[in-house]
Amino acid sequence: MSAVIQLQRDAVVAEARAWLRTPYHHRGCVKGVGVDCCRFLEGVWRAAGYDICEITQPYSIDWNLHRDAELIVDGLLQYCDEIDPVQLQPADILAWRYGRTFAHVGIYLGGEMYIHSHRRSGGVVLDRMSDEEVRKRPMRCFAYRWPEGASYGR
């Protein structure tokens, strides 16, 4: 990985950590005020200077229980490449199946840690990949297409 891409990843991780303790608010995207998981990704990338525009169309709080369409995955694939979990690097995006679709996302921080906004947690928190809540769920991983080029030699 180039030094430039490493700096880009570091900027995303630092910005994500700056959102810690932001309360959960469905469809919100204001650091320190309120954010949900999708808008958290969008807000972090935008504040770090990168483009992940709205990755989903407006959605109800329980859309994933009633639809099969992969709104989040389809949105992520506009800006990211899907990768194998063994390739995870800090700033990569994690998506878990909740209900009928991959409907929850977070940002991988390295080691066992990731950061996300979750209704049950009350907002943006750090969690471990080994926690039962996510360990039992199907997971997909995505690497952002950094401006210098793909970070995995594509």
Image: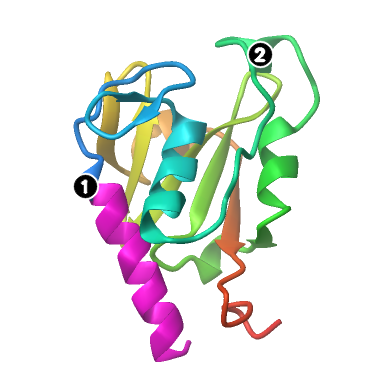
Protein image colouring: rainbow
Residue at 41% in and 28% down: 133
Q: Eyeballing the image, is 32 above or below 150?
A: above
User: Residue 54 at what x, y percent from top left?
Assistant: 61, 38
Residue closer to the observer: 151 or 8:
8
Q: Is residue 33 above or below residue 51?
A: above
Instruction: Count residues near mark 2 (Cα–Cα under 10 Å), then give few for <14, some for 14-19, many for 20+.
Output: some
Q: Principal SS element in the magenta part?
A: helix
Going by the numbered disc 2, the residue's amino acid type is Trp
Image: magenta residue range: 1-17
* C-alpha gap between disc 1 and disc 2: 28 Å
Q: Tag 2's secondary structure?
A: helix
Coordinates of residue 79 in the picture (x, y in percent): 66, 57
Q: Kindly identify the residue that appears in the image at 25 percent across and 40 percent down.
A: 19
Which residue position holds label 1?
18
Disc 1 versus disc 2: nearer the observer: 1
Which image quarter: residue 119?
A: top left
Q: Residue under circle 2?
A: 63
